Image (cartoon, grey):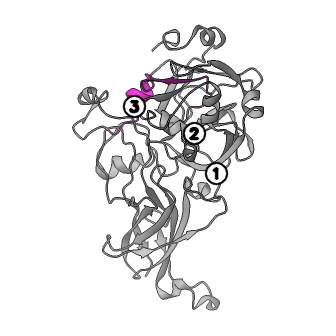
Amino acid sequence: MALDECAPRLLCDKIKPLELKEKPLNREPDLKHLMSRFLTLNEAYDRNHGAIPTLDSKEHHVLIDGPYVSHPQSVSVDDLQRNFPQHEVTCTLACAGLRRHEMRTLLKEVEGIDWGSAAIMNCAWKGPRLKDVLRKAGVQWDGEDGEERHVAFASFQAVCEKEEWYGGSVPLARAMREDMDVILALEMNGQPLTPSHGFPVRVIIPGVAGARSVKWLDRITVQDTESPNFYQKHDYKILPPEAVDAEAAEKFWDVTPALQNMPINSIVASPIHRELISLKPSSKANEDAEVDKGMMEVNGFAVPAGSDGPVVKVEVSVNGGKTWTKADIIEHEKASKWTWVFWRAAVKVRKGSTLTVFSRATDKGGNMQPEKPEWNLRGVAYNGYGESRDVKIDS
């Protein structure tokens, strides 16, 4: 859809979208580096469909309009900072394709970037609540019609691979409920957003696939339908198994709901695949250490499903899921129902064995991580047991 077909003349005249001249920046950090701290700093993953714009916060405005906006307005970044209460929410933001590599290798081939377990970040975001901004623009919500109406977000700053602009949307109810903590983020971990993460303003929707947290935000529209953008309508959906290829998928795009809530998940960070673990003591001083009793330490992270956090239990198995050992969840002052948790466990292993380490998480809402999810063509929302294969215990 061309820019002049979906954006008001006001925006078309002001914005000159960056052309797509090279492959967009898409990368994830080393998992060990990612887990070196609770809040993700410079090691955050990057997911882009077009070029990264460099914008002037003094000139940038966000247009708020739509049939349910009685006072359409263009809001500056300064307005967002000065004229609304600032709210901080610490939450994970994960790529919909998190762990796609595992769906591809453990189930069958899928379409899309081969994301591993590190396409996720856990940050403290700050800015005005979206509901406050919408209320000021005259949006009314009585708590009953929020699922039928939608809040669409658009960025017209860069031409994308499959569309001339980028957009996404969520139900109005998600935007207007205070306990959903949806904000227009101006800061990330106490600093202004970086260009690659949406400077000067982006949406943050905790618990929802990162694809909906639109960066370089230009427009917010309250409307009867979800965003018409390609990345809302023809991507980031859990298609049924019958959609075995692009041709077979065509009839399912319009009838399959857009992915919103991310599923419960956990990953094993250590030991890694094919790691050799030595249980021998390094000195006489640690003869009574757990490693000398045939115990191996396992650690990783876990995230809850949607708004059903926090994660309340993580379990580990080294015998194919026959028995499970409860892991310790490491407390953190910034932890909330939206954040990941770090966990660790000590499990008894036999010297000379080769094994697979599984992890599974349970959240406050009762969601438990499954052994294997159903395959889908786009390889999104994979949340089978966290696992580390072919771990060898030194004899």
Q: Amino acid at mark 1?
A: Thr
Decide: few, some or many residues near mark 3? Use Cα within 10 Å; few <14, some 14-19, many ≥20: some
Q: Which mark is residue 187?
A: none
Q: Which mark is residue 46?
A: 2
Residue at 48%, 30% in the rendered image: 169
Mark closer to the observer (2, 3): 3
Quick one: SS at disc 3? loop
Residue at 52%, 67% in the rendered image: 299
Q: Which mark is residue 40?
A: 1
* Mark 2 touches mark 1? (CB < 8 Å): no
* Mark 1 touches mark 3? (CB < 8 Å): no
> In the rendered image of this protein, does residue 64 appear above or below residue 201?
above
Q: Amino acid at mark 2?
A: Asp
Mark closer to the observer (2, 1): 1
User: Is residue 282 shown in magenta?
Assistant: no
Q: Is residue 216 left or right of residue 318?
A: right
User: Is residue 221 shown in magenta?
Assistant: yes
The majority secondary structure of the magenta stretch comes to loop
User: What's the distance in space between the residues labelled 1 and 3, CA to CA?
Assistant: 27 Å
List the residue tagged with mark 3.
235
Q: Can you give x and y, in whole percent of width and height, for residue 163 in the image?
A: 46, 20
Q: Nearer the viewer, residue 80 or 352?
A: 80
* Mark 2 touches mark 3? (CB < 8 Å): no
> Residue 384: which quarter of the image?
bottom left
